[in-house]
Image: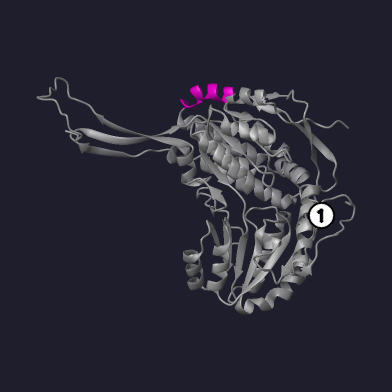
Amino acid sequence: MSIPTIPMIINGEKVESQSGNLVDVLNPATQEVVAQVPFATLDEVDVAVANAKEAFKSWRKVSLAKRQSILLNFQQLVRENTTVLAELISLEHGKTLPDAEGEVGRGLEAIENACMITKLQQGEISDNVAGDVNVYTLNKPLGVGVGITAFNFPIMLPCFMFPIAIACGNTFVLKPSEQDPSSTMLLVELAHKAGIPAGVLNVVHGGADVANHLADHPDTKALSFIGSTHVGTSLYQRASNAGKRAQCMMGAKNHGVVMPDANKDQAINHMLGSCFGAAGQRCMANSVIILVGEAREWLPEMVERAKDMIVGPGSNREADTGPLVSPQAKARVEGLIASGVEQGASLLLDGRGVEVEGYPNGNFVGPTLFSDVTVDMDIYSQEIFGPVMCVMLAEDLEEATNIINANPNGNGTAIFTNSGWNARWFENNVDVGQIGINIPIAVPVAYYSFTGSRASKLGDLGPNGQQAVQFWTQTHTVSARWFAPGTTSSKVNTTISMK
């Protein structure tokens, strides 16, 4: 059986890289090689950028209504291909099919938000600000945009980037993760099938050298990144130093707060799902749970329910959680579990060594739960990105909030409570970008912006919502006066006032 090679897409055509540097794409449940990705040469990256730059000359002039029409076609094609997209996600990432289908749905939200571009890209106008003078703003596209995405959401993350960017009149170069690129490539093919012209949306593959080259390139104007803090910080600095815009959504250590007045069943089930779903490989997972007051008595039940969660391949629709994306990810997670034991945390549930029938080579780690966790432990200070829950205790909501605010990251948080007062106090005092109230994974719907904070985000404007339009456009402010025929001026006006 031949192994497919993932092409680049440049100027609307599939292009085979000449680099010869091939990276295997593995099924994380079996270690079977399902595809190979050739990393692009820097010359090939330059060709992609040059085509995007050339396409910008005509794409920026395409009407808002026409761009909207293409995006409407695109969202319909994505909807029709949800099943195959989800299967590709599950094959290469490992997440369960229901979770993968949910990811496609969240990506569709972002595409549908971009379909509202005729409204979102409107400017402002003020009439007669001075004698016969109007002032108005025009939201103009920037040029060539760049998107660099992580492996954990190969459909949703690109949808956070290129649909709104091209809707605003920009062209785009996307570098998806090399670990699970096939679903992203199908997404881009559907975009071209929907009518996006050649050169408007290009794809290259590669590692740090390709990402850095895109960030430094004089012909790219804005960079959107979602991934690790280390990489995001470096790319943000490079792009900013090169004089372009950058938004970098980065690492997290999210805390979920469980109040004693919460609905116990809902709180336990949702927090377990948040932490262990997708094998913990979500930047919005609540990997730290703070039980407040008498809620600490629920800990034994949390452990028992976690034991009942089913670990299996993504193709098993009964599975609650699938494998980690790679053997290296599994080894790292298991190493952090070992460090938690060594540093004195109480291991109440150990997911190491879990066996899945028929899949002896899978990267499986089962739900793992620690108590007696302190902030100086590696399992707390590092983003584990695996199915590991750290349970902490607090006497009251203020103590729980102080724990969260002392953490360097501020991506997401959640509180489970039946008290409106508790919820309002929490949302006004916690220093985190995205807050869920009885919502375990507080990724906002796409017509609101993604708003991580502190060490979890660099850049003033986030993906999605109105902020995304502001990021992908530059505002031109026009002050205009039209003189009546035959109008004369009696003297030269040397002041700054409009007369």
* Way the structure is coloured: one colour
Q: Nearer the viewer, residue 37 or 404?
A: 404
Residue placed at 51% from the left, 68% from the top? 423
- 418 w.r.t. 247: above or below: below
Q: Can you give x and y, in whole percent of width and height, for residue 66 in the image?
A: 49, 30
User: In terms of image quadrants, where is residue 40?
Assistant: top right
Q: Is residue 470 magenta?
A: no
In the image: residue 48, left or right of residue 58: right
Kind of residue at disc 1: Phe
Residue span colored magenta: 50-62
- 449 w.r.t. 483: above or below: below
Q: Nearer the viewer, residue 400 or 88?
A: 400
Residue placed at 66% from the left, 40% from the top? 80
Q: Can you give x and y, in whole percent of width and height, for residue 492 in the image?
A: 14, 25
Is residue 11 in view from this perspective? no
Disc 1: which residue: 364
